[in-house]
Amino acid sequence: MSEPLDLGLRAQATAIAAGELDPGELLDAALARIEQRNPALNAVVETFPERSREMLAAAPEGPLRGVPLVIKDEWPLPWRAQRFGAAELMAPTAPGESGPYRALRDAGATIVGVGNMHELGAGSTGAISYYGAAHNPWNIERCPGGSSSGPAASVAGGLVAGAVGADGLGSVRFPAAYCGLTGLKPTFGRSAMEGHHMAALTSLIVSGPLCADAADCRLLASVLYGSELAAGDAAGLRIGVVRDAVSEDVTPEQAAACSGAIEALVAETGGELREIELPNLEAATLAAILIINSEDMSGATPEKLNRLSPELSPIARGTLKYRMLLPAAATAQAQRVRTLMRRRLAGLFADVDVIAWPTIPAPAPPLEAPLVELPSGTHSADQANVRGAALANLTGIPAISAPVGLSGDGLPLALQLQAAWGADELLLDAAEALERANGRRWVDAAPPVSAPTEA
Amino acid sequence: MTESAAPGEDFIPAGLAALGIEADETDLAVMAAFHALLWPPLTELLALDTADVEPEHCPDLSRGPE
């Protein structure tokens, strides 16, 4: 057996269940690996070995018994309130049993650490955090993706085999794409959300798994959903593609990798490719931004904004204040656009099973300057990334990001598939078909593991 | 109004003053940059004719529209 910690999620769970792997030793190995590699990655912002050992000692015979996992700093734990990657939140937080915590505990998993995240969940790069930026295991000078930066860097860096993130505007899919992982954004409302500081307010955010491959995501998602996601074969998959900026204003390498992956998926499933039209994607992106801004600011007051922590980043301070100025009419219009896009998608999903386009327009940019060079020019990564992700959050549909190649400088490239409401299982089936089609080349690819830096 | 519109130098200070929100130079620079990015598409969004879009009553986002 290779290093047990380097096994995938289901392989770890299977080995423990078969008595071939001691979960106590696995936990110790995970803690040691975090100590060794985390100084270079800054993926995990807190460990709590005694709590982890208590979880393990009390672990029931669930599907993840004894498997160490990381959870994003977006969820409270009984011994720790979430910080949301920030010095201050607009909403109150407190330690508690969040839905994802209960799901993991009841499945027998061991939470070994809290994953870093982009400050306030408000970025696609992971470059800004109260804890300092997380780093991409494929190149520690590059962004790991956000906002679930730490969960992704933890899995890609081999600290754990699975992690729980959250996705409000692509925050599972971007880091999955940048770090060469598979990341699932569930249908709205299917995965555990209780205890999140915006659970009662949000109409966009969901919890979701980040793992090496689709089968591991299926296992962790089944735990987060509270019901098993049955496997199928995606036979005869009808794939819709859009000839629009979201699929064409991307780097040539990303375009080629995604085109090749789509062709391979058609061949593997005996499916077919259909060109579809999906107008008003730009309006849909802005609509999602406006709605999440309005939901996020529901606890904000001028008085709070006048007393913001000086430890918040200048970008957070400025954008929080700016959000108070957005016209209510724009948010009302955003809701109309949401309805418009939901109806359009309902019509499209009568003709196609999935819609495919690149998860990200370019691979991970430098942490120092998160800009991407696209055919249309130079853009901030946040501005460019969000246009491919927002539709799923706006409308509630599920989406998955799967690795489909490496750029010339060794950074992961990724394809996104989106399906109709409730068709999360089909996305996992399609991602598994894609893995078969490319011989698991990209899900099994391992990043160069960075040596710990000296303190 | 010019096409570059985004008259942040008026809109932002006026809006902050109306709400009693304080801002220093750094805040204002960040807000101006955000405004320049967001405002043009926001005006396009507001101009979109959605009169014939029948609103969904309490949409259930876990399902398709009725």
Image (cartoon, coloured by chain):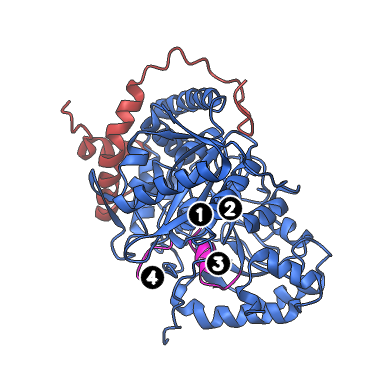
- Looking at the picture, how far across and down is residue A182, in whole percent? 54, 56
Magenta highlight on residue A157:
yes
CB atoms at circles 2 and 1 under 8 Å apart? yes
Do discs 2 and 3 belong to a common subunit?
yes
Magenta highlight on residue A255:
no
- The first of marks 2 and 4 along the sequence is 2
Task: State the SS at label 1.
Answer: loop
Real-space Cα separation, disc 4 to disc 3, in angstroms? 14 Å
- The first of marks 3 and 1 along the sequence is 1
Q: Chain of mark 2?
A: A
Report the span colored magenta.
A140-160
Real-space Cα separation, disc 4 to disc 1, in angstroms? 31 Å
CB atoms at circles 2 and 4 under 8 Å apart? no
- Looking at the picture, how far across and down is residue A438, in whole percent? 50, 56
Do discs 4 and 1 belong to a common subunit?
yes
Of all residues, the one furthest to the top in this rendering is B52
Residue B63: quarter of image: top right
Residue receiving disc 1: A89
Chain B shown in which color? red
Do discs 4 and 3 belong to a common subunit?
yes
Q: Which mark is residue A92?
A: 2
